[in-house]
Image (cartoon, grey):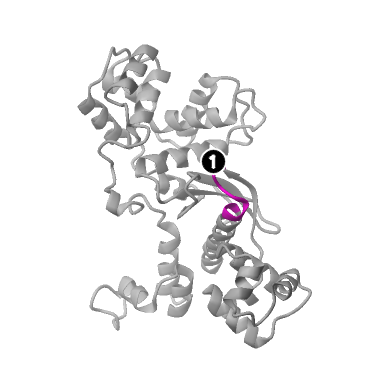
Amino acid sequence: MLGERLKLARKRAGLSLRDLAHRLDDQVTAQAIGKYERGEMMPSSTVLIALSKTLGLPLGYFMSPMQAKLDGIEFRQKAGTTATDRARVEAEVLEHVERYLMIEDILGLDSASWNNPLAQRQRIEDPGACEALANQIRGLWALGTDPIPNMTQLLEQHGIKVLLLSLPEGVDGLTCLVRRPGKEAVPCIVVNQQRTLERRRLTLAHEFGHRFIDPESAYSPEKAANRFAGAFLMPAVHLQEEIGKHRHALGYREIVQLKRIYRVSAASMLLRLSHLGILSQAALVHAFQTVAKDWRKVEPEQLELPELRGQEETPSRFERLCYRALAEDLISLPKAAELLQKRTNEIEVALNGPGRNNASCH
């Protein structure tokens, strides 16, 4: 129990055994910490307190049982990431998910089920199957053909855990399953908060697509997930109604307006129009050689201001559940602060409103 918690906390901090020993001013050796993690030794109370302070976690964290496990972790991009980077990300994801599952348990919510519209993953043979799959999911979730205003909220409403974290530069996002003994696995999608809102939405749709695509499909699962994401966020019928079935070219302002309607990147919009045959391959190449020359690197007229990066379409369900439990006296103020990783005075203001820290909303 303590060993697993200690190993998780160390990885989350991005520290090796030797690094952690050094942070502890060599009170204990790296070998001793390794034995703590393997359950071969127990730290003294003095060492445990030092570990708690060094790793920035309460003592109770190290003593609570650890039930959640991550399975089937798939980084969207592994290029440029080290094994240490991936270990740190996985540890941070598990720590966030554990807090999420804890508040659901406190509220008596069924965290082990999500609204999975399909009984099994689909084998994808060609791009047309990706289009059909996206339309099928939209139909089963009664989404119609309109653009999706908030992709994060949609996934949370259907039981998928969505986390917005600071990931290594080479990683857009990842998907995994959260498993607990005797319960159904829950899907979790993590996106890089450093990315633009346009890219975060596409990553969410891409990782969502992986939940339904058989990894043994004849058509590349990565290409299939990309095609699914485009079809899910930019339905063909709606696009054709907006701009017509065949176009020789589009101007800058029209493309920017379209990206704002569907809340996607301008480059992905052009690719989507090409996939649907609305724009010819020649017109697509011309666009990327002229008006869209830099769009793969620099997003034109971003939906979210750069200085507010990561503040739009953010996961909100976990925070809302914490305040619900606090308002119902199911958790204490310190516990809420621990779960939300905020100061108690911030929690009080959020609960009671500005200038009413001592008031009661019950």
Query: On the image, numbered disc 1 is attached to which residue?
Result: 77
Report the span colored magenta: 78-86
Q: Amino acid at mark 1?
A: Gln
Look at the image and say whether residue 83 sits in the magenta stretch.
yes
Q: Position of residue 159 (x, y in %)?
A: 51, 50
In this rendering, is residue 291 above or below 357? above
Q: Residue at x 43, y 79 (%)?
A: 333
In this rendering, is residue 208 above or below 111? above
In this rendering, is residue 332 above or below 233? below
Q: Residues within 10 Å of mark 1 (few under 14, many from 20)?
A: few
Residue 362 visible (yes or no): no
Relative to 160, 290 lies left or right: left
Kindly indicate the quadrant of the structure image that contains residue 122: top right
Q: Is label 1 in a helix, a strand or a loop?
A: loop
Q: Position of residue 348 (x, y in %)?
A: 34, 76
Q: Residue at x 52, y 36 (%)?
A: 209
Q: Residue furthest right?
A: 40
Residue 118 visible (yes or no): yes
Total numbered labels:
1
Residue situated in front as seen by the camera: 222 or 345? 222
Look at the image and say whether residue 50 sits in the magenta stretch.
no
